[in-house]
Image: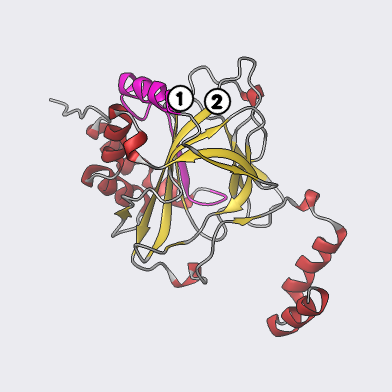
C-alpha cells in the first residue's frame, strides 16, 4: 500500500532520489533537476489561491535596477494550506529526500525562510541573473540548495518569467524553465550557480507569477566552494557588458590579485 502525505507522495520522492541522483549531481551548468507534478495538486491549488489573495502592501517590495519583485516570509500572513506545505518542505522526509538526491549530507531547513517564502512578479517584474547569498548570518550555516515550487496554472512561455540557468562564464543560458503550476526546480547553490528571471513578466490579464522558495543549509561546504560571506551577486551576460567591464574582467583573470586590486582602487578611489 502506498503511503501518501497530504502534501507529497513519499514513494514518488523515493523513486526520484534513487533514479535521478546521478543525473542531478552531473547536470550542467550546475547540479539541478526539474520535477513536474511535485505536490498534491488540490492542496497546491488552494495554496496558489491563498498566496495570490495575500499579495498586498504587507509584502516586501524590491524595486531597483536588478529586480522588480515582491516577497513575504511572514508565516502569520499565510493561509493554512500555505503553512502546511512550508512545514512539509522543512520536514524530516523532505530533508532526507534532498540529501539522497543531491549527495549533500547534514542539510538543515531554514525556519526563518530568509530570502524565501512567497514570491511574486507582477507585470514588468523580473530578477536579473545572479549568484545567491552564501551564508545565513543567524543560523551560521552555508547555503547549499534552492528549491522553487511554482503556482501558475496555464502559464505560457510568451508571458516571460522563465527561470534561466547560465554557465559560469555568463556567455550562455543553458536552460530556460517555464514556471508552470506544480513544477519544482531544485539546484545547488554556489558562487557559480548563476540563475534568474531576467525576462520581464507580461500577462494578458495581469495575473502575477507566483512561487514558493526554500533554501537549505549545512555546517561547512567543500573547499572548492569556499568564499567569504556575501549577499546576492548580480551578473551580466557577456553581450551586456560594456567595453570597460570586458577589460576589467580580462584583467581580473590575467593579473595577480594584488595588482588588479591596486588598479581597481586607483580607478575607483
**Residue neighbourhood size for the residue with mark 1, other residues' Cα within 10 Å, grouped as few (<14), some (14–19), many (≥20):** some
How crowded is the residue under tag 2: few (<14 C-alpha within 10 Å), some, or many (20+)? many
CB contact under 8 Å: marks 1 and 2: yes
Figure check: 105 above or below 152 = below
Which residue sits furthest front?
A: 57
- In the displayed structure, would residue 212 be above or below residue 168? above
Q: Which of 173 and 113 is in front in this view?
A: 113
In the rendered structure, does residue 36 fall within the stretch colored magenta? Answer: yes
Q: Which residue lies furthest to the right in this view?
A: 243
Q: Is residue 123 magenta?
A: no
How far across and down, in percent of the image, does residue 181 sit? Answer: 45, 24
On-image quarter of the N terminus:
top left
Q: Is residue 210 in view?
A: yes
Residue range in magenta is: 28-54
Question: x%, y% of residue 113?
Answer: 38, 48
Residue 52's disc is 1
- The secondary element bearing badge 2 is classed as loop
Residue depicted at 37% across the width and 51% down the height: 102
Rendered image: mark on residue 208: 2
* Vertical order, 261 against 236 (above or below): below
Amino acid at each position: 500500500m502506498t503511503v501518501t502525505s497530504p502534501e507529497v507522495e513519499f514513494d514518488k520522492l523515493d523513486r526520484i532520489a534513487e533514479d535521478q541522483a546521478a543525473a542531478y549531481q552531473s547536470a550542467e551548468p550546475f547540479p539541478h533537476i526539474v520535477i513536474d507534478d511535485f505536490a498534491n495538486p488540490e492542496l497546491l491549488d488552494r495554496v496558489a489561491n491563498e498566496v495570490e489573495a495575500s499579495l498586498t502592501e504587507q509584502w516586501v517590495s524590491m524595486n531597483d535596477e536588478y529586480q522588480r519583485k515582491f516577497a513575504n516570509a511572514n508565516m502569520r500572513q499565510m493561509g493554512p494550506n500555505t503553512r502546511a506545505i512550508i512545514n512539509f518542505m522543512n520536514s524530516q522526509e523532505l530533508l532526507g529526500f534532498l540529501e539522497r538526491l543531491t549527495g549533500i549530507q547534514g542539510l538543515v531547513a531554514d525556519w526563518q525562510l530568509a530570502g524565501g517564502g512567497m514570491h511574486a512578479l507582477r507585470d514588468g517584474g523580473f530578477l536579473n541573473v545572479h549568484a545567491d547569498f552564501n551564508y545565513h548570518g543567524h543560523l551560521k550555516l552555508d547555503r547549499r540548495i534552492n528549491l522553487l515550487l511554482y503556482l501558475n496554472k496555464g502559464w505560457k512561455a510568451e508571458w516571460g518569467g522563465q527561470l534561466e540557468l547560465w554557465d559560469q562564464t555568463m556567455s550562455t543560458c543553458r536552460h530556460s524553465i517555464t514556471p508552470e503550476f506544480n513544477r519544482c526546480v531544485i539546484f545547488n547553490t554556489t558562487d557559480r550557480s548563476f540563475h534568474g528571471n531576467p525576462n520581464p513578466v507580461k500577462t494578458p490579464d495581469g495575473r502575477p507569477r507566483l512561487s514558493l522558495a526554500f533554501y537549505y543549509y549545512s555546517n561547512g561546504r567543500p573547499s572548492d566552494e569556499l568564499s567569504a560571506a556575501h549577499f546576492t551577486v548580480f551578473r551580466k551576460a557577456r553581450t551586456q557588458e560594456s567595453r570597460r567591464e570586458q577589460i576589467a574582467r580580462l584583467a581580473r583573470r590575467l593579473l595577480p590579485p594584488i595588482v588588479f586590486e591596486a588598479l581597481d582602487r586607483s580607478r575607483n578611489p
